Amino acid sequence: KCLKKFSLPLSFYFAVRDRVRSKMERDILAEVNHPFIVKLHYAFQTEGKLYLILDFLRGGDLFTRLSKEVMFTEEDVKFYLAELALALDHLHSLGIIYRDLKPENILLDEEGHIKITDFGLSKEAIDHDKRAYSFCGTIEYMAPEVVNRRGHTQSADWWSFGVLMVSLPRPSSVLWWLFPTWTPVPRLVQRSRNAEEGSA
């Protein structure tokens, strides 16, 4: 097991924001039970701090593994994506939008299986026909509707899933030529801003 600690700041704005995020993470992890999502064993709070006791995963995170290996095999990519898809599908079945899918938030256990962690930006109790409007996530993996604040649903997670899929280092994989016109999100953001300025 490992300990995750949240400090609750004195500033009113940041205190409210961080309290909401830490409570959201605790509530979601208390609800979720899935082999590919990190497990919350228990939580407790002291004055100014919230503590979550989570799985300790010896494999580190996917970002670190990406930085250490020359490339993943196609079988590696299929394996990780399959487990990730199952985890996302489970979250969506509970009305949860994850909203921060990236290699740093995908942990690996000692057997090489993934576990999603860090639910501080997640949104719960969202029906599939309702939208969230917060601008949040990691820009390289954010869906256009999140960037443009048009309202997003669980489908935003699948955009992030697709970005992760095409960005994994696998030169021999067929997936490279399946997306020959893929445009990274930062360029989409700039294109959207240019369009808005031109129509102003």
Image (cartoon, rainbow, N blue to C red):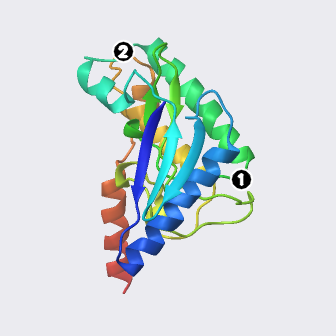
Q: CA distance from mark 2 to mark 1?
A: 36 Å
User: Residue 73, how many percent across, how many down?
Assistant: 40, 13
As shown in the figure, which amino acid type bears the numbered disc 2? Ser
Q: Is residue 107 left or right of residue 67?
A: right
Query: Is residue 97 visible in this depiction of the protein?
Result: no
Identify the residue at image location x=66%, y=32%: 34
From the viewer's side, name the closer residue of 102 and 3: 3
Q: Label 1 belongs to which residue?
A: 95
Q: Label 2 belongs to which residue?
A: 172
From the viewer's side, name the closer residue of 172 and 180: 172
Mark 2 and mark 1 lie on one chain; the one further toward the N terminus is 1
As shown in the figure, which amino acid type bears the numbered disc 1? Gly
User: Residue 65, how many percent across, how many down?
Assistant: 32, 23
Q: Is residue 198 above or below residue 90?
A: below
- Nearest to viewer (mark 2 / mark 1): 1
Query: Is residue 19 visible in this depiction of the protein?
Result: yes
